[in-house]
Amino acid sequence: MVTIRKAKREDCPAMMDLIKELAVYEKAPDAVTVTMEEFADSGFGSHPVWGAFVAERDQQLIGLSLYYIRYSTWKGQRLYLEDLIVTEKERGTGVGKQLLDRTIDFARTEGYNGMMWQVLAWNEPAIRFYEKYQAAFDDEWVNVSLSFQN
């Protein structure tokens, strides 16, 4: 049986393992540079900036949905789904659907007017999964980022 629940600080090491597994899947194994201390503090410190739901089976974390609040000058507050991760051996078992459904329910309950997220263009299994939700895919906007060395 799978349990979906809010993440706790003590989940951070297992969550980071899932994040690193995703980085390998996305062909960027060295891209995860956040420290465990920063990760945990950013979610559970005095000024948390993210929240998460985790999927647990037999006291093992097998998935996570990590989100934060995004503000759109056109739409207002929306939930941004940063990562939806299910460990490889559990993919296709419905865990991702349970996590996404719980996140959608949370967004609605909290009064956000929508959700948004990104998916890699080559990740066909994820694209097919999101299409089942009738998600809109945008081909106009280009991702832009700046990185700073601390």
Image (cartoon, grey):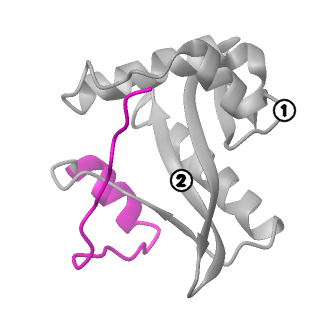
Picture coordinates of residue 88, whole percent (x, y): 36, 24
Label 1 sits on residue: 46
Element at label 1: loop
Is 39 displayed left or right of 45 in the figure? left
Mark 1 is on which residue type?
Answer: Ser
Q: Could you tell me which residue is drawn at 66 percent across and 53 percent down?
A: 103
Please identify the quadrant where the N terminus is shown. top right
**Residue 78 image point, x, y percent:** 63, 70
| Relative to 31, 78 lies left or right | right
The image quadrant that residue 43 belongs to is top right
- In which quadrant will I find the C terminus? top left
- For the image, the number of numbered tags is 2
The front one of 99 and 38 is 38
Residue at image mark 2? 81
Q: Residue furthest bottom?
A: 74
How crowded pointer 2 is (Cα within 10 Å; few <14, some 14-19, many 20+) is rated as many
Is residue 136 inside the magenta stretch?
Answer: yes
> In the image, is residue 55 above or below residue 144?
above
Seen from the viewer's position, the closer of residues 87 and 79 is 79
Give the main secondary structure, helix, strand or loop, of the magenta stretch. loop
Q: Which residues are magenta?
A: 124-150
Is residue 27 at all visible to an observer of this figure?
Answer: yes
Residue type, label 2: Leu
Quarter of image, res 30: top left
Residue density around tag 1, few if under 14, some if 14–19, many if 20 or more, within 10 Å: few
Q: Which circle's residue, 1 or 2, is located before the other in the chain? A: 1
Q: Residue at x 36, y 20 (%)?
A: 21
Residue visible at 69% across and 44% down in the picture: 49
Label 2, secondary structure: give it: strand
Q: Report x, y in % for residue 140.
A: 23, 79
Whole-Å distance between the Cαs marked 1 and 2?
A: 22 Å
Between 78 and 63, which is closer to the camera in this rendering?
78
